[in-house]
Image (cartoon, rainbow, N blue to C red):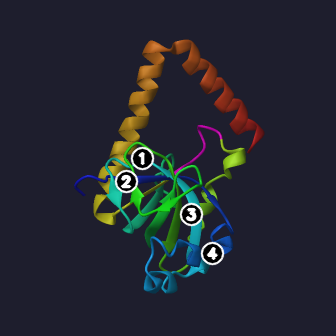
């Protein structure tokens, strides 16, 4: 992979895509594109970590949990389009922005998505899903592990009191939600 390394999916709306009126997107989609979208296999989700401006649609074929790398699935997913602040729908991921995106799975919506919590219940330490190409899977897994370790180390050295408070809060949260 050259520029785009991975996409992080933070949450999703279970039946959000079913409420979409795709015909209202005719200014950015050709009619043939709209007719080929299967809303039963679509979700709306918040994605982050676009390392470069990327034109959509974008196809990826691997998904894994960022904190539980053993939870991985191979399935084709296509990011069709997105919006920022749930306003104007467009066909580009912008570097450094979060996007509310329409994602379509080739077959059915995979079970791994159930690891995500709804936005209203999500805490900073909850699982996110990483979408990437299967050819880049090992590289992405290692990059995520390294990034998490670097943040931990930085926080311990530079902000120990915040790190300790966050760890205590995380532990209490996990004990309450077992």
What's the mark number on residue 21? 4
N-term mark: 2 or 3: 2
The magenta segment is 123-128
N-term mark: 1 or 2: 2
Callout 4–callout 1 Cβ contact below 8 Å: no
N-term mark: 3 or 4: 4
CA neighbours of label 4 inside 10 A, class few (<14), some (14 to 19), many (20+): few
Which SS does the magenta portion mostly show? Answer: loop
The Cα atoms of the two marked residues, 4 and 1, are separated by 27 Å
Q: Is residue 52 magenta?
A: no
Kindly indicate the quadrant of the structure image that contains residue 4: bottom left
Q: According to the image, label 2 marks what residue?
A: 6
Instruction: Using the image, determine if residue 39 lies above or below residue 164.
Output: below
Callout 1–callout 2 Cβ contact below 8 Å: yes
- Between disc 1 and disc 2, the foreground one is 1
**Helix, strand or loop under label 1:** loop
Left or right position of 145 against 3: right
The Cα atoms of the two marked residues, 2 and 4, are separated by 29 Å
**Helix, strand or loop under label 2:** loop
Along the viewing direction, whichever of 24 and 165 lies nearer the viewer? 24
Along the viewing direction, whichever of 144 and 76 lies nearer the viewer? 76
Along the viewing direction, whichever of 36 and 59 lies nearer the viewer? 36
What's the mark number on residue 49? 1
The Cα atoms of the two marked residues, 2 and 3, are separated by 17 Å
Callout 3–callout 4 Cβ contact below 8 Å: no
Kindly indicate the quadrant of the structure image that contains residue 40: bottom right
């Amino acid at each position: 992979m050259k520029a785009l390394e991975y996409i992080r999916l933070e949450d999703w709306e279970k039946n959000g895509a079913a409420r979409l009126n795709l015909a209202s997107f005719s200014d950015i989609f050709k009619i043939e594109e709209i007719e080929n979208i299967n809303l039963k296999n679509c979700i709306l989700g918040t994605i982050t970590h676009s390392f470069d401006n990327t034109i959509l649609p974008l196809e990826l074929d691997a998904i894994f949990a960022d904190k539980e790398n053993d939870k991985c699935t191979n399935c084709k997913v296509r990011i069709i389009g997105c919006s920022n602040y749930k306003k104007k729908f467009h066909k580009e991921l912008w570097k450094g922005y979060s996007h509310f995106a329409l994602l379509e799975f080739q077959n059915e919506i995979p079970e791994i998505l159930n690891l995500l919590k709804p936005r209203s219940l999500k805490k900073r330490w909850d699982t996110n899903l990483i979408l990437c190409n299967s050819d880049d899977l090992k590289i992405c897994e290692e990059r995520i592990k390294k990034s998490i370790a670097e943040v931990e180390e930085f926080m311990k050295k530079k902000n120990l009191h915040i790190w300790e408070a966050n760890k205590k809060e995380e532990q209490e949260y996990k004990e309450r939600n077992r």
